[in-house]
Image (tube, helix red, strand yellow):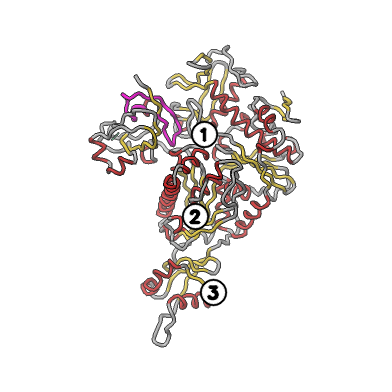
Amino acid sequence: MAKYTIDFQPVGRRVECSEQETVLDCARRSGIGINSICGGVGTCNACRVQIVSGKISKPTDIESGVFSPEELKAGWRLACQTHIPGDCRIYIPPESMTTPQRLQVEGLEISVIPKPTVATYDVQIDAPSLSDLRADAERLLKSLNHQYNLRCRQIDQSVLHTLSPQLRSEQWHCQVAVRGNEIIYVNKAGSRCLGLAVDIGTTKIAGYLLDLSNGKVLVSRGLMNPQISYGEDVISRLTQSMISEESGKQLQSLLVESLNQMAAGMCSEVGAKVTDIVEAVAVGNTAMHHLFLGLPVRQLAVSPFVPVITSALDIKARELNLKFAPGVYVHLLPNIAGFVGADHVAALLSTGMRETKDTSLLIDIGTNTEISLVKKGRITAVSCASGPAFEGGHIKYGMRAASGAIERLRIEGNAVHLQTIDNVPPVGICGSGILDAMAQLYLAGIIDKTGKMTDNYPRVRNGQKQREFVLAENPEIVVTQQDIRELQLAKAAIRTGIQALLNAHHCTDDDVRQVIIAGAFGSYIDVSSAIAIGMLPSLPLDRFHQVGNAAGAGAKLSLISLSQRNLAQKIAENVHYLELAGTPDFMRLFTEANYLGRYRLEDSRRRYLD
Ligand code: FES
């Protein structure tokens, strides 16, 4: 019987499936939660999925009754009706999942005095008469400038299209949103003045709706980046976008659509309209930044990986098809380099790294890990290709942090103690669990310093092609020798980046007084496991701080404070970017950093600490 692989997204779990099974059967067998209210007989439509790549079976009569021809063409099917004739990638939308992904949006909360770029004013305007024939626009400008002592001179053209009827229907009393010397929106008097901050990650998007009058966060929301169905890491996303102009546009519109939905959902949660948003700030890595703006990405994907632009940008929402008021601006924080983006600038801003007196490291771990070292006000950044292993990619039973993912584990004697997300039976293993597994296997002597797995342990067996360690038996979850190799590459990339920065600043591990670990994955890892495998330098645990979504916190700061926004620009201008592959001894460092254990890298050699 032919077997095929289904890559379930955004869960990130790959499962073998036969053509006889339905997609729903396969998901159930693997513990992946797809809604099936009717039990799989095709009457509830709760199991909608989208086959985004690979072969698609002909729709059944039931599916033809549920989906439009366009939807069927776009790969939408019912999981309980669809059989798979070949390898494929399937996207499970949030409404079809039994339990949501873990999407971390929380981060540092820093209070600054709110002084946003946009201010709103309630304006009383004199109605025209035979003795006052001024045009409506001039009338509005004059009243606004006079009542608030401003020097506003410009009105966005979208405002002009609706201004005359609006002033009359509001009986010459309205709220005006002003940015610089431009009126960007006219709203009902007394409307709310809201702002949106978004951190567009390769995997996840975090959104924050703020009240700009007091800087308070009203709602936070996380969602999976919908582009994930077109590739998990930055490079595959860029490759997809380069296929054709159409593919690039498709990736952009997927993102824009989900931002529109997220903004509308957050506004309705607080009884506001999406047009009450008068300013937005977006941060993301350079690739996400370019895909969001629809900029060309070919030069980003090939050496020497040059972005189109690194400076901050202000773009009208209408140019991006965002459904805020059309004259509203979206501010994009500056990037640093091809693989160190505005999200890292935002993280540097929110963690106060520029002002810190102590030699400090900021590490944002992801499929691409950005690291900065700050010493005496000088900031140097590197980007490390850590790959998708910590997101569960390239790991046999790897998955993202969703229900049923093993997130912690301990090995005691022959027993393995597992902790899963939501305390349900294990489905797979996510990043923090994989990190623990590697540390525990090493500490128990089941893998050696080179990462080689012994066969002299009850839970180790010879699999089809390689040794594997059995974590759970029903359903079966193993860590293979190949998984260990993937993790070694990922952790070596990070340790090499850290060491290259230390070398560039002529300092050692001991000089580092604080290590700030940012990002969703970094928040959940056990730092002692990361030290045990040599991913992080061996320092006292109280020097490590896991701060959550620091990029999101920086986006919020830049939204509510113009001075913080200006500071972000200064940070980006002053960061020295170090191209890791061009650093002396890079390959030797990387080779050494592949080894496990607690060690220093001195003169590019390991010196074990125990
Ligand atoms: Fe009800 Fe598929 S499970 S329609």
Q: Position of residue 73 (x, y in %)?
A: 31, 40
Q: Which residue is mark 1?
A: 391
Q: Residue furthest bottom?
A: 131
Q: Which residue is mark 3?
A: 148
Q: Is residue 293 visible in the rendered structure shown here?
A: yes
Q: Which residue shows up at 55% across the image and 37% down it?
A: 367
Alpha-carbon span between mark 1 and mark 3: 52 Å
Q: Earlier in the sequence, mark 1 or mark 3?
A: 3
Q: Verify whether residue 104 appears in magenta.
A: no
Q: Verify whether residue 15 appears in magenta.
A: yes
> Which one is in front in this view, the residue at disc 1 or the one at disc 3?
1
Secondary structure beneath label 1: helix
Please report the bounds of the magenta region as a residue range. Answer: 6-26
Q: What amino acid type is highlighted by mark number 3?
A: Tyr
Q: Quadrant of residue 493?
A: top right
Q: Quadrant of residue 136?
A: bottom left
Quadrant of the snapshot with the C terminus? top right
Q: Which residue is mark 2?
A: 196
Quadrant of the snapshot with the N terminus? top left
